Amino acid sequence: MVPTLSDPGKKSGLDEFLVSEQNWLYRTFRFFDSDRVSCIHKLKLAINGNGDGVDDTSYIKSWIDAAVKRKVQHLRVMWFVKYGEMPLSFYVCETLVSLNLVCVALDDVEFVSFPRLKTMHLLCVRLSKDAAFERFISCCPVLEDLRIAGCVNEPLSFRVHSQSLKRLIIGRGNLTHQVDSVPGVVIDAPQLCCLRIIDHVSKSFIVNNLEYNAKLEVNITFGLKVSDEESISSGRSLIHSFLSGILKVGDLTINSDTLKIIYDYSKSESLPQFGYMSRLCVSVMAQYLTWLEPFLKSCPNLRSLVLVLLTYHFILFDPLFFPRQFPNSLPERMNQINFSCVPKCLQSSVEFVDLKFQISGPVTEMKMKLVRYFLENSAILKKLTLHMYSNSTEDEILTKLLQIPRASTKCEVVIVIK
């Protein structure tokens, strides 16, 4: 165990205390002496394994207990030796405002109360029972910011119910690890204005009461290892439930994994209409831009579109995209891009398009074809933003841009040069 101790100073109420390695044990006990310190505003504890034989971590619980008694408001505990336990007094800390835990074990205690806690970040935390986690969240009546990722013994059914929560980030599983899928995620937070879900293990996602002003970012696979006809068919009802729950979202950022699944789903089922959506940010490989077409058709009032083109190498070994074979002749496939028709939103509502890729460089002709598509078909487009490296082809690209006819006479092309 390697702590460090900053000079505790001479004040009875300290802004911050960080445990360190020099004379750490003696100085820490002196610091937590009730006659020396009456109030601790912020406490950060980082416990690391150093192989020097200092293994007794029993002091940590007493330090946290002492901090609770001294009305700590901001607590950060990073326990890299093992999953450290928290004292019982921690679970009823009335003064705690922000909490950041890394590799900490949360017990199934009978009573939990954090009446002032507004921010809680949990990373690689070991959770106990499903109901215990749900109770842990529900006992934070003013919680506004919750982030949880990489947790051990996660509840199979991940439920978040909060009347105060405004920001929520959930990270579960990874496509690079073969993890069995689990039942799902249920979110019921009517005040939520920012939701980010990165989840490659949950089968279902139920999002209740998500309103127009909410920003949603999703990178989910519905527990599927591959996106093929059989897999989509088995998960059809789960995909439908998720899409129905986000109908009122006004700002959506969607990952290529999720877009691929929705595209395959749209082959057999009609997508619902996302009439409230005004901004859409999509990441996709260039040769699979047609995945975007069904979704654009379902956003009749879209005003802003941000398109991020992923590189070939970024996605090459993703089984969700290429379950049986790798793409061949990349430049040729990219030049075959063609939307079968123009979505209604391009003709009537889209005012801003930002193409988040370098217009110069490899397969420039394909990229220019995409630029031409938006300029020729976006009837009320006000601004098209392009990105380009400063190089010898700059003048040539600018000349081509000037030659493209524009459906909107008010369209301004903005080029960001790096």
Image (cartoon, grey):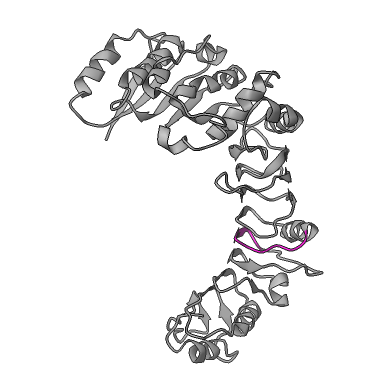
On the question of residue 383 being in view, the answer is yes
The residue nearer to you, when weighing 40 against 145, is 145
Q: Is 196 above or below relative to 300?
A: below
Q: Is 11 above or below relative to 148?
A: below
Residue at image point 52% right, 19% down: 290
Residue at image point 71% right, 40% down: 203
Question: Quick one: quadrant of the C terminus?
Answer: top left
Instruction: Please give left or right for residue 327 compared with residue 143 in the image.
Output: left
**Residue most toward the front?**
324
In the image, the segment drawn in magenta is: 117-129
Instruction: Please give left or right for residue 396 compared with residue 307 in the image.
Output: left
Magenta segment's dominant SS is loop
Residue 89 x/y as whole percent: 71, 76
Q: Quadrant of residue 38?
A: bottom right
Residue at image point 73% right, 71% down: 92
The residue nearer to you, when weighing 143 against 266, is 266
**Residue most toward the left?**
392
Q: Quadrant of residue 120?
A: bottom right
Question: Disc count in the image?
Answer: 0
* In the image, residue 126 lies in the stretch drawn in magenta: yes
On the question of residue 274 being in view, the answer is no
Residue at image point 73% right, 32% down: 235
